[in-house]
Structure formats: structure tokens, C-alpha cells
Image: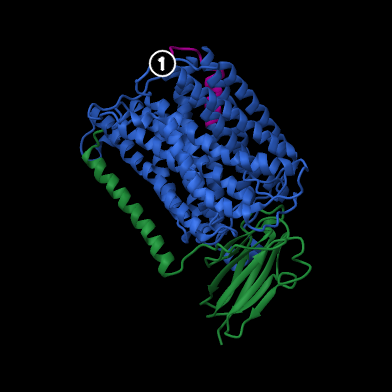
């Protein structure tokens, strides 16, 4: 195995173990919420498991998997990862951080959920571990940029390979996003957690958190888009519809991912409505590249279907490789993301948000987006990646074929009732939705039970995935190793201006947009009279 | 860069849709005063239970019939837990917290507030339909989060 393959696989291993643990937490929650008597069914364990599920899936599984994808794309497009030792240093730092945070959560001293809103106060280990995870990911970012610059020095004027273009956009989004998190954690939370200062302002902390929290979702989504654009057309037997527009789409994510976070704080006091309205506009702007993605990727798939003899208005769909779990996973991800995207337009709607804010609708929403569009794409890509890295065939191919469909069914079963219950007023993140049997709460109980069925189906699918991955890594015989191949662009696709490959320039413009969108409300928050709060650990 | 004709149509349609969405939001914000709660009043969370509006929370009826309801959201209870207000008049809810973040959501309405220590959250609504409304906390606040529950009894207007 090559050095790069070892690095990629190490990151995939951590991602998959975190995913499996997180899935275990999730099925317990689904069953507990449905009122099934469990020996461990206490509020304490419930909220602990919600914290663990959120951290392990949303922060650990995603970050490690994206680091793996980044290294994979760098190696396969540029032929070289520059600074291997830094890549490994990043891996170990992130892993140590993950272990610290996970142990802090499992010890019951840090039940603050993955959003860790002060003045809820976790054990310092929780924050230090999370910081190390982010520092590890910054080393990943540095290695990605360093590899690109080293390649650029030897290839002046050459176009950036498209898949790498998307991963570099991911790196840019991640750096812009984590700047906000760094302020929240390093300036406010760590000094307070270590007792150097007594108090912390919850609204200031939340504002920096959501500076990070929304572009975080594009940090998850962009690598999935990279796979949709640059690999899936090839898997389906076709070509990419437009290379140029794809670059424009990736750059738009650098620009508009970050100055949008206040749409998570519509119901917050302390922030004037005008700034919330501005962030509504930028949030609608960031929907545009996703709408373009829908056209370009589906047009590429149509091209693939027609290349294989599919005819008629929809006949090309039938001939696509529905038994290939990577293709099926991505196709189902796209369908699911269309639903989740429209839900997102409602979340971002300035005044309508009040109908859904912090209700079960929200958990339904992000399980369609990050929980399916991103996670199912990543799971599918594992089936594509592993044999090409190790030379081993996929173990239990039937399980692998079935797994994305199970996930899709389970997730619809979980998310659609969650959306409806949310519209009926059911809050999210509650141990039980019973509320002493009052009439309003009675109405959402059947929906919660249906969600629990979805949760069990999802768990079965998750275990199929873990079984196939572990089997493929350890048990399968070594056969021929297929090459990694990316989709070519269609001949009609002319290149975009080289301007769209200027990452430094676009990142600088993004910084300006962030300054405009966040400068005034943050200045106002920091200069107004405030009464910061002491910490509480009610768990 | 060549962009396919149909993709160009699609992009214009996407822009049209987004302009429609944002236009609707701006129009309802300007003409219908449909805004999210964005009150910017501050308060000391460590003294609010000692004296002042939130030391004795409850319902105040003004001379013109408008009603103000002051509440505290604190570890696992809303104070007061039960509130009686008349239908058909504007009711302003003012709420704050002496401890961590809470939520204040009146189920079946669009009153949905984040409650933060150090800040006063505020929303005004008019209940058209008499009856009992469930109030829940929708921001995780600790192990008793799911126990936070209140009721607003809306009585037929005079």
C-alpha cells in the first residue's frame, strides 16, 4: 500500500468508528423517545447520548472523512501530497482531541450537546479536545494548500484539476468558518472554562458559534458535491456537463457560505432585526449554486444514460447503474437534498422561521441534508474508494447494494414525521414529548413512534455499512486494483476564465463580505452594556 | 465560457424564484410587520429575582386593554407556570432567564423566543381563539429540559 493510501485509510477508519458509535447512540434515542422501556432509559443518559451523537457524527465522522477525501483527491490529481509528516501530525492531534472530547462526554461531565452554548459549562477536557480536533484539521488545510502550491510552482498556467478545485474551495470555507469558532473558544470559552474569567456572554458566544455553524454545513456538503460533479458522471458511464460552471459554483460557496449565520439566531434577543434580514438575503444567495448543481449533475447523468442507450424523456434513468451502491447512494442523496433544500429555504425565511425554530422540524431538516445528502454520499464513496486503495474487493456486495436504499427509506420514515411534528409545535432535543399528556402533545406521539421505526431502519443500514467496510478492509481477498478516475467534461463545455481558479482572491472577497455582514452587529454587541453570565452544569 | 441554453433558462428561473422568496419576505416585513423577535434590552441576571419586573412576574393589564406578561424561564419551570390572558387584544410577552439559555414557544402560535441570561426577549401576539395553549422550552437547558412546561389560558374577550 502506498504512503498516501495509508494516510487516507487511517482517516477513514476513525470516521467509520465514530460513525458506528454515533449510530448506536442514535438508535437508543429513537427507542427511548418512542417510550420503549430501556434499562438505560434515563434523562441523563438520553442527553449524554444526544451530545455524543452530535459530536461524533457532525464533527468527528464528517471531519475525518473529509480529510480522507482531501488527501485522496490531492494524491490522485496532483500525484503528490506535500508535507506527509504534517498530515500525520494533524491526524494524531485530531485523534487525541477526539478521544479527549469523547471521554469527557461519556464520563457525564459534558452533557452540553454539540452546540455547547454557554453558559452551559462542560468539563475543560471537552473544549480542549474539540480545539485539538480543529487544530488537526487546520494542519490538513495547510497540507492541502501546500500540496497545491508545490504543484502550481511546477505547472504555471495549468488549470487546477476540477476535483481538487472543489476540495480547495472546501479548505477555504473551513478556514473562514473556523475563524469564528476560534474566537468563540480561544477568546471566550477556554479562559472561562479554566477559571481565568468568571463570566461569559451567551449571545456573543452564540454569534461566533453560528459564524462557524452555518459554513460548517458547506464544509460537509462541498466534498459531497465534488464527488457528485467529478466522480459520479464517470461511475454512471458519462461525462460532466459543464466544467466551467462547476468552478463558478465552488467559488460561490467560498463567497457566500459564511456571511449567513444569523439565520440561526432569528429568535435571539440582543441582535437587531435589520442584520437578521441581511443574513436572510445572503442565505438565499447561497441556494443559487445548489440549484445550478441540480441541473449540471442531472444533465451529466442524462448524458451517461443516453450514452448507454437510454432513450425517451425518462428512459435514460432506467439504464443508470442502480445496483452500484455509490451511484445509488448519490442518486438517493440528491432526491433527499431537494427536499432538505426547500426545508432550508423555510428555515432561512426571516419571519416564517418562528414556526419551525428549534422544533422537531429542525432535526428532520438536517437529517435530510447532512444526515443523508452528505452522509449517504460519503458512505457510497467508501465502496468506491476502498477497493481502489487496498486492491481488495467489496465484502458482502449484496449488503452494500441494499444499504443506501435502506438508509433512504429509514430516513424518510424518520424525517418526514419529524417535520410534521415540528410544525405541530413539538420541540427538538427532548427526552420525551409527552408533556404530561396535554392534548397538543398527544397529537405528535404517533409521529414520534413512526420516527423511531425510521431510526431502527437507519441503524440496520448503518450496521450494514460498518460490516461491509470492516469486511472490505480486513477480510476480502486482494484482487486487481482499479485506478481512480474522474469524469471528463463534455466537449461542448468550454473552460471558465482562469480567474475562477484564484483561491486567494476569492477568499479575500469572502473576508470582505464577512466583515460587512458580521462587523456591525458584532461591533454593536461588543460595545453595548451587557451582563455576562456565570457557568452552569445542570447534568 | 459556454453555458448551455437550457441551463441558462434554469439559472434565470432559479434567480427568479429566489427573488420571489426574498421579495415576499421584504414585502411582509415592511407592510405586515412580520419580523423575528429582535428585542435588544439587557438585564442583570443575578439581581432580577431580587427586585423589579421579573422578581414578581405576571400579567399586567394596561388602561387601553393591552396586556403585558412578564415571565422568568429558569431551571425547569416557567414563572408563572399558568397565565390567563384575554382573546382579541395584543399581548406582549417579556421573558428572561437567571441561569442558562431556554426557549419559550407557545405551541400553535408563532411566538418562539430564545431566552438568554442578561437579555430580555419580547414578542407581541393577539390570540384570536380562546383555549389552553401549551408552552414548551425548545432550547436544551439541562436534564430537566423536557419537564419545562407552561400553559396560557386564553379567555373569551370582553
- Look at the picture and state if B145 lies above or below A291: below
Compared with residue A96, is residue B12 higher up or lower down, i.e. above or below?
A: below
User: What shade does chain B have?
Assistant: green
| Location of residue B2 (image quadrant) | top left
Whether residue A125 is in magenta: the answer is: no
Q: Please say whether residue A329 is visible from this viewpoint.
A: no
Looking at the picture, tell me which residue is in the foreground, A175 or B16.
A175
Tell me where residue B131 appears, x and y as whole percent: 57, 76
Which residue is painted at 33% across and 28% down in the image?
Answer: A498
Residue A470 is inside the magenta segment: yes
- Residue at the far bottom: name it: B158
- At 60% from the left and 24% from the top, the residue drawn is A90
Residue A275 rendering spot, x and y as whole percentages: 50, 55
Tell me the colour chain A is drawn in. Answer: blue
How far across and how far down the image is residue A213, in percent? 55, 44
In this rendering, would A513 be left or right of B23? right
Q: Please state if A232 lies on the left or on the right of A58 as rendered.
A: left
Question: Does the image show residue B63?
Answer: yes
Q: Which residues are magenta?
A: A465-481
Question: In the rendered view, would you say A113 is above or below B118?
Answer: above
For disc 1, the marked residue is A482
Disc 1 residue crowd, few under 14, some 14–19, many 20+, Cα 10 Å = some
Question: Quadrant of residue A289 in the image?
Answer: top left
Amino acid at each position: 500500500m502506498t504512503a498516501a493510501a495509508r494516510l487516507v485509510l487511517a482517516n477513514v477508519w476513525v470516521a467509520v468508528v465514530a460513525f458506528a458509535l454515533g449510530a448506536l447512540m442514535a438508535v437508543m434515542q429513537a427507542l427511548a423517545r418512542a417510550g420503549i422501556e430501556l434499562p438505560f432509559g434515563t434523562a441523563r443518559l438520553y442527553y449524554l447520548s444526544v451530545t455524543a451523537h452530535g459530536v461524533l457524527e457532525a464533527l468527528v465522522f464528517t471531519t475525518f472523512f473529509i480529510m480522507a477525501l482531501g488527501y485522496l483527491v490531492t494524491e490522485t490529481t496532483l500525484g503528490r501530497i506535500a508535507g506527509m509528516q504534517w498530515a500525520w501530525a494533524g491526524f494524531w492531534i485530531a485523534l487525541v482531541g477526539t478521544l479527549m472530547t469523547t471521554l469527557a462526554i461519556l464520563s457525564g461531565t459534558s452533557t452540553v450537546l454539540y452546540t455547547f452554548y454557554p453558559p452551559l459549562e462542560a468539563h475543560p477536557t471537552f473544549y480542549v479536545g474539540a480545539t485539538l480536533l480543529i487544530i488537526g484539521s487546520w494542519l490538513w488545510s495547510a497540507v492541502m494548500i501546500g500540496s497545491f502550491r508545490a504543484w502550481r510552482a511546477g505547472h504555471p498556467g495549468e488549470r487546477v484539476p476540477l476535483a481538487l478545485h472543489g476540495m480547495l474551495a472546501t479548505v477555504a470555507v473551513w478556514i473562514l468558518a473556523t475563524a469564528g469558532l476560534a474566537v468563540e473558544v480561544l477568546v471566550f470559552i477556554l479562559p472561562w472554562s479554566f477559571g481565568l474569567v468568571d463570566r461569559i456572554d451567551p449571545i456573543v458566544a452564540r454569534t461566533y458559534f453560528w459564524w462557524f455553524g452555518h459554513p460548517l454545513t458547506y464544509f460537509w456538503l462541498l466534498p459531497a458535491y465534488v464527488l457528485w460533479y467529478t466522480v459520479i458522471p464517470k461511475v454512471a458511464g458519462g461525462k460532466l456537463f459543464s466544467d466551467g460552471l462547476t468552478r463558478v459554483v465552488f467559488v460561490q460557496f467560498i463567497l457566500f457560505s459564511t456571511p449567513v449565520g444569523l439565520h440561526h439566531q432569528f429568535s435571539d434577543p440582543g441582535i437587531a432585526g435589520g442584520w437578521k434580514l441581511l443574513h436572510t438575503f445572503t442565505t438565499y444567495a447561497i441556494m443559487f449554486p445548489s440549484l445550478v448543481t441540480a441541473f449540471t449533475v442531472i444533465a451529466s447523468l442524462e448524458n451517461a444514460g443516453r450514452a448507454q442507450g437510454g432513450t425517451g424523456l425518462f428512459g435514460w434513468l432506467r439504464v443508470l447503474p442502480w445496483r452500484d451502491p455509490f451511484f445509488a447512494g448519490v442518486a438517493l442523496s440528491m432526491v433527499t437534498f431537494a427536499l432538505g433544500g426547500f426545508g432550508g429555504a423555510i428555515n432561512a425565511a426571516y419571519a416564517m422561521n418562528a414556526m419551525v425554530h428549534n422544533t422537531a422540524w429542525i432535526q428532520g431538516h438536517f437529517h435530510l441534508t447532512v444526515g443523508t445528502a452528505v452522509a449517504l454520499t460519503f458512505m457510497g464513496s467508501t465502496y468506491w474508494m476502498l477497493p481502489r486503495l487496498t486492491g481488495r474487493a467489496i465484502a458482502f456486495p449484496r449488503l452494500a447494494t441494499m444499504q443506501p436504499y435502506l438508509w433512504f427509506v429509514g430516513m424518510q420514515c424518520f424525517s418526514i414525521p419529524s417535520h410534521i411534528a415540528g410544525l405541530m409545535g413539538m420541540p427538538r432535543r427532548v427526552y420525551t414529548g409527552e408533556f404530561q399528556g396535554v392534548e397538543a402533545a398527544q397529537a405528535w406521539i404517533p409521529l414520534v413512534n413512526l420516527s423511531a421505526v425510521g431510526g431502527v431502519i437507519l441503524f440496520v443500514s448503518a450496521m450494514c455499512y460498518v460490516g461491509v467496510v470492516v469486511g472490505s478492509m480486513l477480510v476480502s481477498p486482494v484482487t486487481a486494483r482499479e485506478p481512480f478516475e474522474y469524469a471528463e467534461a463534455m466537449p461542448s463545455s468550454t473552460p471558465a476564465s482562469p480567474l475562477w481558479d484564484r483561491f486567494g482572491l476569492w477568499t479575500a472577497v469572502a473576508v470582505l463580505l464577512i466583515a460587512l455582514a458580521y462587523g456591525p452587529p458584532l461591533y454593536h454587541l461588543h460595545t453595548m452594556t451587557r451582563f455576562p453570565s456565570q457557568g452552569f452544569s445542570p447534568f | 465560457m459556454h453555458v448551455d441554453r437550457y441551463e441558462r433558462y434554469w439559472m434565470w428561473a432559479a434567480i427568479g424564484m429566489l427573488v420571489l422568496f426574498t421579495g415576499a419576505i421584504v414585502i411582509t416585513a415592511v407592510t405586515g410587520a412580520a419580523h423575528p423577535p429582535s428585542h435588544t434590552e439587557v438585564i442583570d441576571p443575578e439581581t432580577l429575582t431580587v427586585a423589579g419586573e421579573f422578581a414578581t412576574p405576571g400579567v399586567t393589564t394596561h388602561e387601553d386593554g393591552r396586556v403585558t406578561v412578564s415571565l422568568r424561564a429558569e431551571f425547569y419551570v416557567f414563572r408563572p407556570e399558568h397565565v390567563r390572558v384575554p382573546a382579541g387584544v395584543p399581548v406582549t410577552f417579556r421573558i428572561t432567564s437567571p441561569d442558562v439559555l431556554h426557549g419559550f414557544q407557545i405551541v400553535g402560535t408563532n411566538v418562539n423566543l430564545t431566552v438568554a441570561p442578561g437579555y430580555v426577549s419580547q414578542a407581541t401576539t393577539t390570540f384570536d381563539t380562546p383555549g389552553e395553549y401549551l408552552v414548551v422550552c425548545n432550547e436544551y437547558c439541562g436534564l430537566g429540559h423536557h419537564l419545562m412546561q407552561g400553559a396560557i389560558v386564553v379567555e373569551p374577550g370582553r
